[in-house]
């Protein structure tokens, strides 16, 4: 049975943030709120935790996982970013965008697309996520919490606890989310490609 923390969306309680990070450091899988919907997260190097997330969401090895980062300097450790890509990402972050980029050697190969070696990178605008990342001092390996039979991500922590409490180590209740997914932008080519239009404004990527 998972633990259930109610963390204030604007002023996260340090004690609960520390406990949540300790759960991840011990190999746990958490459900947590972002600036779009709820997500599943774990530490980047925890293979068993990643496998549990794959099982919950019925994901194959072609799924692009996302690394949730604190800032652009951390992002550049895990993704290959040139100057034009950096400027573009800087103009859109923090915010509800996921960028598809070539991963670096710092990213375990099992987390990247098996052929393209790509990874999703995200710098969200969310006080709870920022507090978790600051305490963790590392990215969160993440994917949107959308169950296989659902067309939309999960938006309510109490629903998540009711459905998934036996499969998670922690559910963080940070309030109801609007459910709009992130806008996914591929930066693999010279011209940005919108792979999914979501909450983030796509006009930032217009020519």
Image (spheres, rainbow, N blue to C red):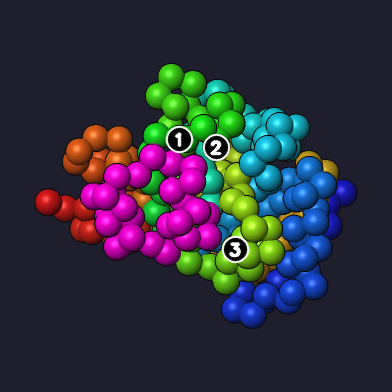
Q: Which secondary structure class fits the magenta region best?
A: helix
Q: Earlier in the sequence, mark 3 or mark 2?
A: 2
| Mark number, residue 80 | none
Instruction: Give the CA distance from mark 3 to mark 1.
Output: 22 Å
List the single residue furthest toward the bottom: 11
Q: Is residue 155 visible?
A: no
Q: Are marks 2 and 1 in contact (CB under 8 Å)?
A: yes
Above or below, 155 relative to 112: below
Q: Position of residue 84 (x, y in %)?
A: 23, 50
At x 59% / y 31%, what residue is drawn? Answer: 108
Q: Are marks 3 and 2 in contact (CB under 8 Å)?
A: no
> Crowdedness of circle 3 by 10 Å Cα count: few (<14), some, many (20+)?
many
At x 45% / y 56%, what residue is drawn? Answer: 73
Reading the image, the residue beneath label 1 is 103
List the single residue furthest toward the left: 207
Name which quarter of the figure residue 92 lies in: bottom left
At x 74% / y 74%, what residue is drawn? Answer: 14
> Crowdedness of circle 2 by 10 Å Cα count: few (<14), some, many (20+)?
few
Instruction: Give the CA distance from mark 2 to mark 1.
Output: 8 Å
Reading the image, the residue beneath label 3 is 129
Is-magenta flag for residue 90?
A: yes
Tell me where the magenta segment starts and ends, as one range. Answer: 69-95
Compared across the picture, whether 199 is left or right of 206 comes to right
List the single residue furthest toward the right: 1
Above or below, 93 relative to 166: below
At x 73% / y 67%, what residue is drawn? Answer: 17
Q: Earlier in the sequence, mark 3 or mark 1?
A: 1
| Mark number, residue 106 | 2
Instruction: Give the CA distance from mark 3 to mark 2.
Output: 21 Å
């Amino acid at each position: 049975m998972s633990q259930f923390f109610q963390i204030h969306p604007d002023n996260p309680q340090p004690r609960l943030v520390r406990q949540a990070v300790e759960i991840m450091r011990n190999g746990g899988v958490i459900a947590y709120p972002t600036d779009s919907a709820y997500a599943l997260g774990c530490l980047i190097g925890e293979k068993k935790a990643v496998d549990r997330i794959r099982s919950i969401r019925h994901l194959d090895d072609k799924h692009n996982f996302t690394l949730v980062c604190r800032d652009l300097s951390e992002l550049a450790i895990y993704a290959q970013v040139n100057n034009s890509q950096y400027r573009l990402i800087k103009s859109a972050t923090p915010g509800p965008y996921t960028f598809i980029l070539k991963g670096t050697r710092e990213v375990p190969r099992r987390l990247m697309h098996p052929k393209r070696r790509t990874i999703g990178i995200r710098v969200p605008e969310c006080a709870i996520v920022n507090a978790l990342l600051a305490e963790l001092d590392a990215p969160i390996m993440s994917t949107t919490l959308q169950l296989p039979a659902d067309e939309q991500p999960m938006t309510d922590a109490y629903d998540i606890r009711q459905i998934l409490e036996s499969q998670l180590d922690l559910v963080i209740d940070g309030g109801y989310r609007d459910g709009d997914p992130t806008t996914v932008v591929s930066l693999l080519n010279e011209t940005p490609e919108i792979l999914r239009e979501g909450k983030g404004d796509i006009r930032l990527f217009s020519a």
